[in-house]
Image: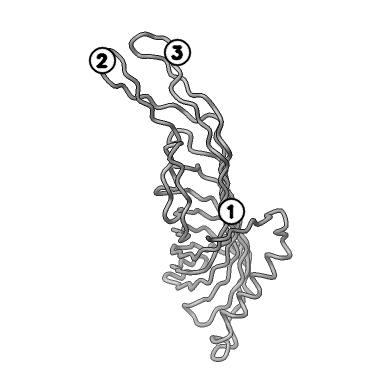
Amino acid sequence: MRHHTRIDFSLLRIENVKLLASALLAVLVAAPLAVAQDGAIVTGASAVYSVPVGSLHNRFESALGGMVFIGKQISSDWTWIGKCEYFELSTINAGKLTKTVSIQEAGSARQYQVPLSKLSMSLKAIGLTAEARLTVLRLSSVETDLHFGFGFYKWDNVRSAYHDSLFVQSASSGSTIKVADLEVPENRQSDWSGSLNLGCDVNVKLVDPVRLTLGADYRLIVGELWQALDLDMESVSGMQCISFRVGISVSF
């Protein structure tokens, strides 16, 4: 049986984030530094708006998170980045999370979609990513790059217990009918998973060496959120998001 541990995200202070990002950076730049000693150091922070896609969108709405990063320019076009990101999805997609029930009316079966009004869930994750950035356009005040990366995330997913009776209003008689009694226990998952991401950035020079950074990413965390058949909730195989970022970066 697989053993799952619970992570306390209240303990993830900014000092720990900086330490983790710095440790990852040391690994990323160790080899390139042997060849390139004069590249710029790049560091910064961004607000990240994560939009769940695929089956993850069937559970959660979008949410705001954050990211810090530090890296090393190893050539005129290539930069290695180590970044640490945190996000929490806690607003459920109420339009997708419904229970389908079927009752006999006027000699035939009729289906109803019943909202799960007492359901609550959250997905919290913190991750470290190694990222390669390729500059594809360089103007006097604007640079554009493409990037791809890989890393790992520690994530914690919680679904509340659900104890409720479900009622529908009959379309034929207009009366209120009890259609189900749900007694579903709480579910908690906690795990480490690998991740992949790719995207692009636009860096606009504000006051040298400060730049405004705008970006977009596709991110995949290779993990599974379990199904809950009594709630008509399918499993999520691969946690996918499109993220949009805005932040500040500094080169020195």
Give the camera-side residue of 242 and 59: 59
Position in image of residue 177 (x %, y %): 43, 15
Give the camera-side residue of 1 and 189: 1
> What's the residue type where badge 1 is placed?
Asp
Outermost front residue: 1
Quarter of the picture holding the C terminus: bottom right
> Does the CB distance between marks 3 and 2 fall below 8 Å?
no
Up-down relation of residue 171 to residue 41 (above or below): above
Up-down relation of residue 247 to residue 69 (above or below): above
Left or right, residue 12 beside residue 76: right
Residue under circle 2? Answer: 107
Residue under circle 3? Answer: 176
Which is in the foreground here, disc 3 or disc 2? 2
Q: Secondary structure at mark 2?
A: loop
> What's the residue type where badge 2 is placed?
Gly
Q: Secondary structure at mark 1?
A: strand
Residue under circle 1? Answer: 156
Dot 3 or dot 2, earlier in sequence:
2
> What's the residue type where badge 3 is placed?
Thr
> Does the CB distance between marks 1 and 2 fall below 8 Å?
no
Q: Give the CA separation, mark 1 to mark 3.
A: 39 Å
Q: Give the CA separation, mark 3 to mark 2.
A: 18 Å
Q: Give the CA separation, mark 1 to mark 2.
A: 47 Å
Dot 1 or dot 3, earlier in sequence:
1
Dot 1 or dot 2, earlier in sequence:
2
Q: Which residue is rendered at x = 26% and y = 18% of the image?
A: 108
Q: Which residue is rendered at x = 47% and y = 49% of the image?
A: 226
Badge 1: residue crowd in 10 Å (few <14, some 14–19, many ≥20): many
